[in-house]
Amino acid sequence: MQSNNLLSSLLSSSAQTTSANQMPVPPQQQDPLAQLRDIHVPTEVNIWPLDWGWWVAIAVFLLALFCLYKTITAHIRHNKARKQALALLESISAQQSNWPVALNSILKRTAMSYYPTQQVAGLFGKQWQAFLTSALKSSDSKLENDLGLLVSNVYQATPNPSDFETCKGAVKNWLLKAKLPKNKGAYGGVNDGGLNDGSAHDKQTKEPHHA
């Protein structure tokens, strides 16, 4: 009887000890997600009104864009007559009986697109050749001689067909190498109509004695 009571006492004591050791688990430890904080969406950033620094940057960008536009358009306008002359040059062939006059006319009309008409139209022969030479960016003895060959053919009743390629090449090289003035206004009333509009002085260049 005593042994049964002792066994019951030991079991009861063990049960109480086990119950005491089993402490309740906090809810936060039971659910790990409960420890996470709510996600806070950042406040929307409003870029308007712009800071003064941005206005300065925009103004500088627009100014640079305008300057670039002016530079490009000025370059295109300046080379308009030169490009027209190069295109017209390709239409001239050795089969034309007056090819020296036609080649010389391209040079004369191009020069009058950049220099005053009064300054260029009255130049013939050696004076005209000297003007063409003076317009070159740098000295080129071969080109100078080829231009002289063209001028001499203008005065011949029957030009030498073998000189055609040399003379045509001289015209092309002069158009590419000539240092043509950019500030047309500084030279007076320069014809800005390109090569499409002939003048009375242009017609003179078609005559052999008015090269």
Image: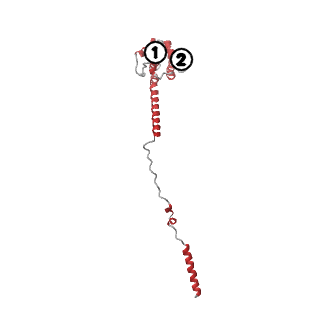
Which residue extends farthest bottom?
A: 1
Q: Residue at x 54, y 19 (%)?
A: 143
Q: Are marks 1 and 2 in contact (CB under 8 Å)?
A: no
Residue 46 percent coordinates (x, y) = 43, 46
The reply, left or right, for residue 9 in relation to residue 107 is: right
Q: How is the image coloured?
A: secondary structure
Between 45 and 193, the one nearer to me in the picture? 45
Q: Is residue 50 above or below residue 21?
A: above
Residue type, label 2 = Glu
* Label 2: element kind: helix
Between 80 and 116, the one nearer to me in the picture? 116
The reply, left or right, for residue 146 in relation to residue 189 is: right
- Indicate the quadrant where residue 195 lies: top left
Residue 210 percent coordinates (x, y) = 45, 12
Residue type, label 1 = Gln
Quick one: quadrant of the N terminus? bottom right
Mark 2 residue crowding within 10 angstroms, few (<14) / some (14–19) / many (20+): some
Residue 99 percent coordinates (x, y) = 46, 17
* Label 1: element kind: helix
Q: Residue at x 54, y 17 (%)?
A: 144
- Could you give the CA–CA distance between mark 1 and mark 2, rounded to whole angstroms? 20 Å
- Indicate the quadrant where residue 200 lies: top left
Residue 199 visible in the picture: yes
Residue ID for mark 1:
119
Residue ID for mark 2:
144
